[in-house]
Amino acid sequence: MKLLVVGAGGREHALAWKLSRSPRVRRVYVAPGNGGTAREPGLANVPITDIDALGDFAAREGIAFTVVGPEAPLAAGIVDRFRARGLRIFGPTQRAAQLEASKHFAKSFMQRHGIPTAASETFSEPAAAHACVDRRGAPIVVKADGLAAGKGVVVATSLAQAHEAIDTMLTANRLGEAGARVVIEDFLQGEEASFIVLVDGHHVLALASSQDHKRLLDADRGPNTGGMGAVSPTPAVTSEIHARVLREIVRPTVDGMAADGTPYTGFLYAGLMIEPGGAVRTLEFNCRMGDPETQPILVRMKSDLVDVIEHALDGTLDRASIDWDRRTAVGVVLAAGGYPDAPRKGDEITGLPRAGAAFGDDCWVFHAGTVLERERLVTAGGRVLCVTALGESTQAAQGRAYRAAESIRFAGMQYRSDIGARAASAAATRD
Ligand SMILES: Nc1ncnc2c1ncn2[C@@H]1O[C@H](COP(=O)(O)OP(=O)(O)OP(=O)(O)O)[C@@H](O)[C@H]1O
Ligand SMILES: [Mg+2]
């Protein structure tokens, strides 16, 4: 069969790579893809981003099903438009994707259905928002309602910072329509983790747990980024926490969406705050897999992802299961100089194999911001590559990933040297 993956990042390279390993798959098209998907055996890039043109392509090529990587096409209604033409596609409808596309929607949904999250209020009037901040005090969190590509959340440690965030979003309109409303919520403390499941409208199948590293610099310092690395599993999600998240967050969310007439299908990502006492709250929902969490999660998946997604499309996820490699996977993002504000582009990348993600035993390099210019690989975005490795321990996986990273070169390359360190120290404390 032939499949289509929509997107251009490291998440999509990993998804397409994993799907292509199924013996049932002849080719996976990636639209528009990147320099890595262009060179991966079994994959082919398609230079299309328009939704209706993608539908035409899927119909013409007899694509068995489409998987959508990023949130923007989901929020724009790609699933509704494919389904209207009878094309099989895995993702949420436009209305269901509001769980990510509108933080106000997500918060009122969670309040209505008793799903644990930080207490919050929503404002479009600056004066009322400023008054709320003064009333609640700092630290406090100010979030743009809409999609803001990771730039819409300010965790304010002082009142001045919170007021400034409100001015930026509501008064100066710096984030446009996405910042026309803000959610102001209580600051939560604890350990963050990513909990991603597949949903078929009713049944749920959990993927392995993971943890992202959002800050640019070691020891979680510096500005927020799209994600500088991830580890799977994370010791923060014990089997007890896992059960609790399914019972208190995921199950009521899936049931609530169905009850509200917007049944959820697709990957559902709950960003968790695991509080010191073991209580779990939802920081946010995303309506797709995480980037870079996808990369370490998928190198651990032993089952055929095609079979699992087919169950999800057929509404039979209760009959599916996933086998996981019990080892730890660490994914280290190699970013361009100047990232996240002004990443440099156009630098040649050396030290990679001629084709394919495989980079020695139990190590893979997934591409994000790369393009193939004739035979040369060149940087083309902020997050350039994600080196992902498996190991018997977090330290072993780190060692393998960082050895590979050191052999890759491009001008201005920057990466964190401590991806997985929290998981490693948690494991050490437990031993
Ligand atoms: N209530 C909160 N208390 C403490 N920290 C928070 C809170 N809400 C958000 N954060 C911090 O801000 C980060 C981003 O918040 P959130 O996940 O809501 O934004 P986002 O832009 O949708 O993120 P993503 O790019 O992962 O989708 C979180 O990962 C967390 O570190
Ligand atoms: Mg989000």
Image (cartoon, rainbow, N blue to C red):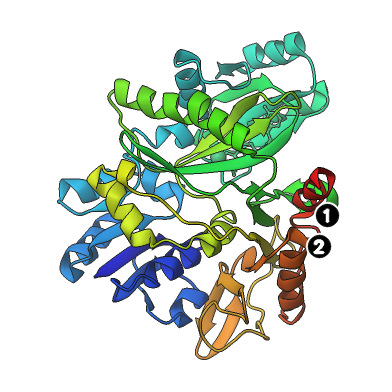
The x and y percentages for residue 409 are 73, 81
Residue 52 appears in which quarter of the rendering? bottom left
The x and y percentages for residue 281 are 61, 26
Name the residue type under label 1.
Answer: Asp
Calculate the distance from the C-alpha at mark 2 to the C-alpha at mark 1: 6 Å
Is the C-beta separation of discs 2 and 1 under 8 Å?
Answer: yes
Answer left or right for 370 relative to 39.
right
Q: Which mark is residue 168?
A: none
Q: Earlier in the sequence, mark 2 or mark 1?
A: 1
Depth check: give the residue in front, 302 or 404: 302
Residue 173 visible in image: no
Q: Which mark is residue 417?
A: 2
Q: Secondary structure at mark 1?
A: helix
In the rendered view, tell whether residue 85 sits above or below residue 342. above
Residue 206 visible in image: yes
Residue 408 appears in which quarter of the rendering? bottom right
Answer left or right for 407 relative to 314.
right
Residue 120 appears in which quarter of the rendering? top right
Depth check: give the residue in front, 316 or 339: 316
Disc 1, ligand 1: is the CB inside 8 Å? no
The local crowd at label 1, few if under 14, some if 14 to 19, many if 20 or more residues have their Cα within 10 Å, is some
To which residue does mark 1 refer?
218
Residue at 59%, 73% in the rendered image: 364
In the rendered view, tell whether residue 66 sits above or below residue 188. below
Ligand 2 placement by image quarter: top right
Name the residue type under label 2.
Answer: Ser
The local crowd at label 2, few if under 14, some if 14 to 19, many if 20 or more residues have their Cα within 10 Å, is some
Quadrant of image for the N terminus: bottom left
Q: Secondary structure at mark 2?
A: loop
Residue at 63%, 77% in the rendered image: 346
Answer left or right for 279 relative to 111.
right
